[in-house]
Image (cartoon, coloured by chain):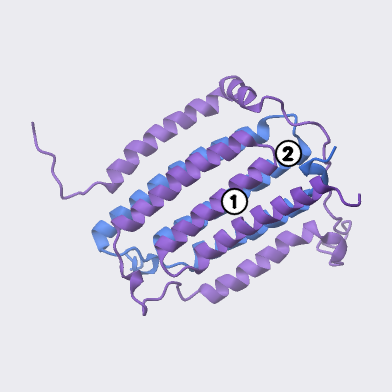
């Protein structure tokens, strides 16, 4: 019987996750907009989740550890997004900008 | 395996989902307006949910759609609309000055990530002298069937062996809820005494 696991090698998922992670890093490093930086962080978290699920399915499919781990990561990512966006809104209230390179309060 | 229609369909669906996910991610980086970036992010999340379905993690796919698409992406759209900014102007730069160096660094990092995946094609020996040369990483792919009835099993696991992290996570979410409201409130606004 043909299953997706027997047809698609694990390395393809890892390759895709690596590419997504790199795109996320680039977004976090190069965007001036603080919301854009947060989007990059979300992409990186998603790439890690994809890695975990792929490893779960291919290496240890008869245990639940991989899925539980991903559930926790998704919950923490939601919390991170909520606090990050609250910070962006607060920043906009105080300085009327959301460009990360214009916030130089600690630069001295 | 000559013309196996199932295999072809699975390959096709993998590549379609991968293309949607990667295209959405690239759109996040390349879109000029941050609103468009957020919409591309939703596209990328949906592609990821499709990949989870292909990996037979149905519950995770549902959670992905409900949490990422319905929660985080909408939160991001709210934040975009609550902070009117000058990005719409054509002469305001979207990226900062370190973007080319960031591109170089990220490209190097990507190559480093690829090395263990395709080590047979690279003859680089990255190990320090005295150690055995780098071997291609192989994982023991298990042929076992995934956990049957996985939603039920997940619920039992969250209430069984993982109950402590589960409760801590609930506490964290409560703290985050209060903290986000506190951080995002208007400091000038005074609540009237009743």
Residue B53 drawn at (x, y percent): 65, 41
Q: Is residue B75 left or right of residue A93?
A: right
Q: In this view, does A105 lie above or below B77?
A: below
Q: Disc 2 on helix, strand or loop?
A: helix
Q: Which residue appears at 49% of the width and 25% of the height?
A: B167
Viewed as shown, does residue B42 lie left or right of B49? left
Residue in view at x 71 percent, y 59 percent: B113
Where residue B123 sits, quadrant-wise, is bottom right
The numbered dot on residue A3 is none
- Residue B161 visible, this angle: no
Q: How many numbered badges does the structure rendering display?
A: 2
Q: Colour of chain A?
A: blue
* Discs 1 and 2 carry the same chain letter: no
Which quarter of the figure has residue B16? bottom right
Cα separation between marks 1 and 2:
18 Å
The answer to whether marks 1 and 2 mark residues whose Cβ atoms lie closer than 8 Å is no
Where's residue A42, x and y in %? 51, 52
Check residue A57 in the rendering and tell me which mark sits there, or answer none: 2
Image quadrant occupied by the N terminus of chain A = top right
Taking depth in this image into account, of B83 and B31 the one nearest to the observer is: B31
Q: Mark 1 lies on which chain?
A: B
Q: Which tint is chain B?
A: purple
Residue at 75%, 49% (x, y): give it: B9
Question: In this view of the protein, which residue sits in the foreground, B156 or B115?
Answer: B156
Q: Nearer the viewer, residue A102 or B15?
A: B15
Q: Which residue is drawn at 77% across and 52% down?
A: A11
Tell me the quarter of the picture where residue A21 sits.
bottom right
**Residue that carries the numbered disc 1 in the rendered image:** B47
| A55 relative to B96 in the view: left or right | right
User: How many C-alpha atoms fall within 10 Å of the one at disc 1: few (<14), some, or many (≥20)?
Assistant: many
Q: Can I make out residue A29 in this image?
A: yes
Q: Where is residue B43 in the image (x, y as percent from the top left)?
A: 53, 54
């Amino acid at each position: 019987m043909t299953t997706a696991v027997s047809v698609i090698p694990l390395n393809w998922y890892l390759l895709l996750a690596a590419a997504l992670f790199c795109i996320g890093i680039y977004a976090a490093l190069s965007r001036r907009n603080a919301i854009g930086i947060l989007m990059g962080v979300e992409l990186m978290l998603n790439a890690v989740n994809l890695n975990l699920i792929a490893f779960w399915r291919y290496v240890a499919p008869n245990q639940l550890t991989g899925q539980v781990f991903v559930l926790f990561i998704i919950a923490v990512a939601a919390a991170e997004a909520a606090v990050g966006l609250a910070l962006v809104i607060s920043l906009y209230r105080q300085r009327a900008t959301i460009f990360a390179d214009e916030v130089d309060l600690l630069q001295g | 395996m000559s013309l196996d229609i199932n295999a072809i369909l699975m390959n096709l669906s993998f590549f379609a989902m991968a293309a949607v996910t990667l295209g959405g991610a690239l759109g996040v980086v390349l879109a000029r307006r941050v609103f468009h970036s957020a919409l591309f992010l939703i596209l990328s999340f949906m592609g990821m949910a499709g990949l989870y379905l292909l990996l037979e993690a149905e519950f995770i796919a549902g959670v992905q759609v409900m949490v990422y698409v319905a929660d985080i992406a909408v939160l991001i759209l709210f934040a975009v609309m609550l902070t009117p900014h000058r990005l719409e102007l054509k002469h305001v730069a979207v990226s900062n000055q370190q973007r080319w160096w960031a591109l170089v660094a990220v490209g190097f990092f990507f190559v480093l990530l690829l090395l263990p995946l395709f080590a047979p094609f690279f003859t680089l020996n990255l190990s320090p002298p005295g150690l055995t040369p780098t071997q291609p990483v192989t994982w023991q792919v298990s042929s076992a069937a995934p956990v049957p009835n996985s939603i039920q099993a997940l619920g039992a696991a969250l209430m069984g062996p993982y109950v402590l992290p589960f409760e801590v996570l609930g506490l964290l979410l409560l703290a985050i809820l209060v903290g986000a409201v506190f951080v995002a409130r208007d400091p000038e606004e005074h609540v009237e005494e009743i």
